[in-house]
């Protein structure tokens, strides 16, 4: 094993320890435990694709939703100045725009979740295949000297396989 492989292996172990500590901190939070014991939390735990889609949707919809709220506050200030009709029109147009953007984000979040799920399965399959190939290669290297020894010295009873008919 070269020094760079050892370095990367050590860094990966460090990263794994850090991720495990973050995971443990999240899982021991009382609010997370209460949510996971709720019916909705258990539903999401049983359906990881829907959970991932919901997470992607919430993450992607934060910016348009924030912009919509800023627009609402801006129109409320304008309404205080006496432009009530413009506020209603702007809120209606903004609401329809937000609805269209959120519908697009739902489709996009399902697509991103599908790509992430397919990538996860593909990468894990490739890694499993490589790991099995490496193990079988190591096993064949370890068993090879024994098979050469067996070819040089056959067992004594191997040539005496004659059945007697009476």
Image (spheres, rainbow, N blue to C red):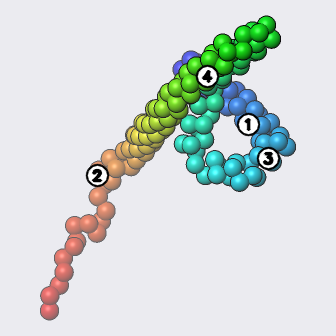
Task: State the residue position of label 4.
Answer: 92
Between marks 2 and 1 in the image, the one whose residue lies nearer the viewer:
1
Quadrant of the image occupied by residue 94: top right
- Which mark's residue is nearer the viewer, 4 or 1? 4
Relative to 32, 136 lies left or right: left
Is residue 155 shown to the viewer in this render? Answer: yes
Question: Closer to the N terminus: mark 4 or mark 1?
Answer: 1
- Pointer 2 residue: 151
How many C-alpha atoms fall within 10 Å of the one at disc 1: few (<14), some, or many (≥20)? few
Which of the two discs, 3 and 1, labels the residue nearer the N terminus? 1
Left or right: residue 93 versus residue 34 is left
Front in this rendered view, residue 70 or 163: 70
Q: Is residue 96 above or below residue 137?
A: above
Find numbered disc 4 in the image and state the secondary structure of the residue it sits on.
Answer: helix
- Nearer-N-terminus badge (2/1): 1
Q: Earlier in the sequence, mark 2 or mark 3?
A: 3
Task: Name the N-terminal-most of marks 4 and 2.
Answer: 4
Characterize the local packing of mark 3: few (<14), some (14-19) or many (20 or more) Cα atoms within 10 angstroms.
Answer: few
Distance from the alpha carbon under mark 3 to that under mark 1: 13 Å
Nearest the viewer among 49 and 40 is 40
Q: Which residue is mark 1?
A: 23
């Amino acid at each position: 094993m070269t020094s760079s492989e050892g370095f990367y292996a050590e860094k990966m172990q460090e990263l794994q320890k850090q991720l495990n500590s973050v995971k443990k901190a999240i899982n021991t939070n009382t609010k997370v435990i209460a949510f996971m014991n709720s019916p909705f939390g258990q539903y999401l735990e049983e359906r990881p694709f829907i959970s991932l889609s919901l997470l992607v949707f919430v993450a992607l919809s934060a910016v348009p939703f924030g912009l919509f709220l800023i627009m609402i506050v801006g129109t409320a200030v304008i309404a205080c100045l006496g432009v009530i009709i413009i506020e209603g029109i702007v809120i209606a147009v903004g609401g329809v725009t937000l609805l269209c953007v959120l519908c697009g984000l739902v489709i996009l979040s399902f697509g991103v979740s599908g790509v992430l799920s397919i990538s996860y399965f593909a990468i894990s399959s490739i890694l499993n295949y490589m790991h099995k190939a490496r193990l079988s290669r190591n096993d064949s290297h370890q068993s090879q000297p024994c098979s050469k020894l067996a070819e040089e010295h056959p067992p004594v009873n191997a040539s005496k396989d004659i059945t007697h008919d009476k």
